Image (cartoon, grey):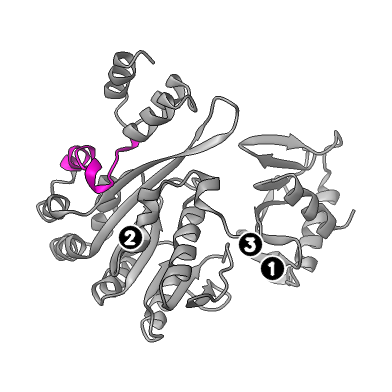
Amino acid sequence: MGMDELLQQMIDAKASDIFIIAGLPLTYEADGRQNRVGDEPLRPIDTDGLVRAIYALANRSMEPFEASHNRDDDFSFAVPGVGRFRVNVFRQRGSLAAVIRVIPFTLPQPDDFNIPPEVMRCADFQKGLVLVTGPAGAGKSTTLACIIDKLNHERSGHIITMEDPIEYVHRHDRCIVTQREIPTDVATYAEALRSAMREAPDIMLLGEMRDQETIGTAVTAAEMAQLLFSTLHTTGAANTIDRIIDAFPANQQRQIRIQLSMVLQAVVSQQLVPTVDGGLVPAFEIMVANTAIRNLIREEKTHQMDSVIAAGGAEGMRTMDQSLFDLVVAGRVASEVALQCSIHQEALAKRLEAAGL
């Protein structure tokens, strides 16, 4: 079977990730469950051949990767008529290995991924900073792709995305959509962001705010009347704001607090939670920056943010524990699983007990 046929088979199986690792049969993950293809474990010679076939299909040279023995290789490619794939190639126990993320050509639809209307309302902001946070693999890219697609269909302007690598491909609609891949099209996020500021942007998607330079440039861009979306590997709005502030030296933290309190529009935190039927469903914390939230950021009282979020239901806010409680009430998630994923376990346990769940 050729590599393109294998990838088509994985698309048909609705695989999210494919694992090519010696000592294990070819394995793919679908709905949070692993599936083995056959019983024969792959040998190092097999993984080597499969990895080389991936490079050939991607029309990419292996030489830079082979020349460096202390790094992995991360890239994406498309197979016409099949789909788009994000690949990480690495070495383990002396053999080549790869994990392939499967990205269908069709853009995700919010309803298919249980993304609530309150999250999609982030597309209604005209300017400022919107952050989507959560651990790796929590679905941040999917959520952002849905929001960008909505903007592309409802608003006119120039959307610039900066990603490492590009996952979802957006076609020009009411907006012009420019997509730049790090490091193929531009060396770094900071460089891409500085360049984007000279390209008449209306909406920007910055794949990740990795360091002080990128964060500082992103906040400045959001101050200049653009709408900017980005991600962080944090859980919860309070932790996200603290992480941004802590990226700066002490003598600059007061200034960044003031800037952030003015430009931040929303923080959406998400995680994937196992369902009772063996699948996965996202749970969301949604924080909208109202006057109370902005004051807490300025006054270094982020620890009080949870209570403001809990009381902000009328403004579309919800805590992670509220989201988990709703999933239990709906019969989608077991109580014990919700408690494992909760932020304040004792409080959620009492609430579930009071509800007889």
Which of the two residues, 325 or 42, is positioned nearer the viewer here?
325
SS at badge 3: strand
Sequence-first tag of 2 and 1: 1
Q: Tell me, for residue 67, which label it has, or none.
A: 1
How far apart are labels 3 and 2 at the CA level?
30 Å
Q: In the image, which residues are magenta?
A: 303-320
SS at badge 1: helix
How far apart are labels 2 and 1 at the CA level?
40 Å
Q: Which residue type does callout 2 highlight?
A: Val
Q: Tell me, for residue 73, which label it has, or none.
A: 3
Q: Position of residue 173 (x, y in %)?
A: 52, 75
Q: Quadrant of the C terminus?
A: top left
Please name the residue shown 32% across and 33% down the image.
322
**Mark 1 Cα shell of 10 Å, populated few (<14), some (14-19), many (≥20):** few
Q: Which residue is mark 2?
A: 130
Sequence-first tag of 3 and 2: 3
Residue 266 in magenta stretch: no
Sequence-first tag of 3 and 1: 1
Which of the two residues, 39 or 113, is positioned nearer the viewer here?
113
**Mark 2 Cα shell of 10 Å, populated few (<14), some (14-19), many (≥20):** many
Q: Is residue 210 visible?
A: no
Which of the two residues, 275 or 18, is positioned nearer the viewer here?
275
Which of the two residues, 21 or 81, is positioned nearer the viewer here?
81
How far apart are labels 3 and 1 at the CA level?
12 Å
Tell whether label 2 touches label 3 (CB within 8 Å).
Answer: no
